[in-house]
Amino acid sequence: AQSVTQLDSQVPVFEEAPVELRCNYSSSVSVYLFWYVQYPNQGLQLLLKYLSGSTLVKGINGFEAEFNKSQTSFHLRKPSVHISDTAEYFCAVRGSGGYNKLIFGAGTRLAVHP
Amino acid sequence: DAGITQSPRHKVTETGTPVTLRCHQTENHRYMYWYRQDPGHGLRLIHYSYGVKDTDKGEVSDGYSVSRSKTEDFLLTLESATSSQTSVYFCAISEGDRGDSPLHFGNGTRLTVT
């Protein structure tokens, strides 16, 4: 079975500062990894995904994530955040073989302050 | 927006009453999902469908049933609502069942059971 742990429930940061949101997963099979963002009163929007190939994945809004198989991590980063990045971010994992459900972490609330 | 409409967007109901939530998609995707979102739990899968009249349980299916009589509609029913079912419910769709198929989410239904 797969599981996802997001290590920080809340991350406060000042505008234009860098940020890292941490995600670790556990799985006995190869996986695909995703980051979703949820703005207030909205659904989830796909930010980026790792399927295969380069371990550094670039997504929308200037975010990127790095897949580290040895550490079973998929941390999300942005070099300079904006007020508009304030949202909740979810890491998710899905097994690569056959049909597998998408399993979500508990979420990290990013609060960007002026 | 991936062509997913959830209705109603908000609902308040009393304990013991039946409630049906509707998800309508215009993408003609085969796979549809119902998730619930609760603080500290992220999103948890309730039920999913892999075709008309083909459904299966997720990890938190107790107290819920689903139906899919048309490709575009996926209904979630709470036969007898309880306070523990107060939550935000999200519908999602995906084109395929492979692990690399991302899910696209609706804007959610906020359900309060009093």
Image: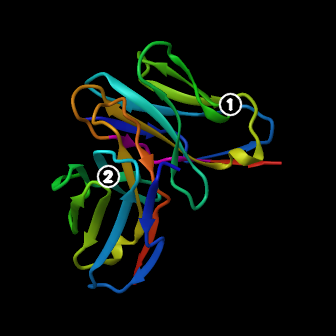
Q: Nearer the viewer, residue B9 or B82?
A: B9
On screen, residue A39 versus residue B40, left or right, reads: right
- Residue B33 is marked as 2
Label 1 near label 2: C-beta < 8 Å?
Answer: no
Q: Three-letter amino acid code at disc 2? A: Tyr
Please tell me how crowded label 1 is: few (under 14), some (14-19), or many (20+) other residues with Cα within 10 Å: few
Q: Which residue is mark 1?
A: A62
Q: Nearer the viewer, residue B55 or A69?
A: B55
Where are the magenta residues, as a range? A102-109
- Whether marks 2 and 1 lie on the same chain: no
Image coordinates for residue B102, horizontal then vertical, percent: 41, 37
> What residue is at 26 percent from the left and 36 percent from the top?
A100
Please tell me whether residue B106 is drawn above or below residue B10 in the rendered image.
above
Quadrant housing residue A56 = top right
Question: For numbered disc 1, what is the local secondary structure?
Answer: helix
> What residue is at 27 percent from the left and 54 percent from the top?
B71
Q: Quadrant of the C terminus of chain B?
A: bottom left
Please tell me whether residue B84 is drawn above or below residue A27 in the rendered image.
below
Image coordinates for residue A59, horizontal then vertical, percent: 59, 29
Quadrant housing residue B34 = bottom left
Furthest-right residue in this view: A114
> What residue is at 16 percent from the left and 56 percent from the top?
B53
Q: Nearer the viewer, residue B78 or B32?
A: B32
- Residue A52 is marked as none
Image coordinates for residue B98, horizontal then vertical, percent: 29, 31
Furthest-top residue in this view: A53
Please tell me whether residue B5 is drawn above or below residue A44 in the rendered image.
below
Q: Is residue B8 magenta?
A: no
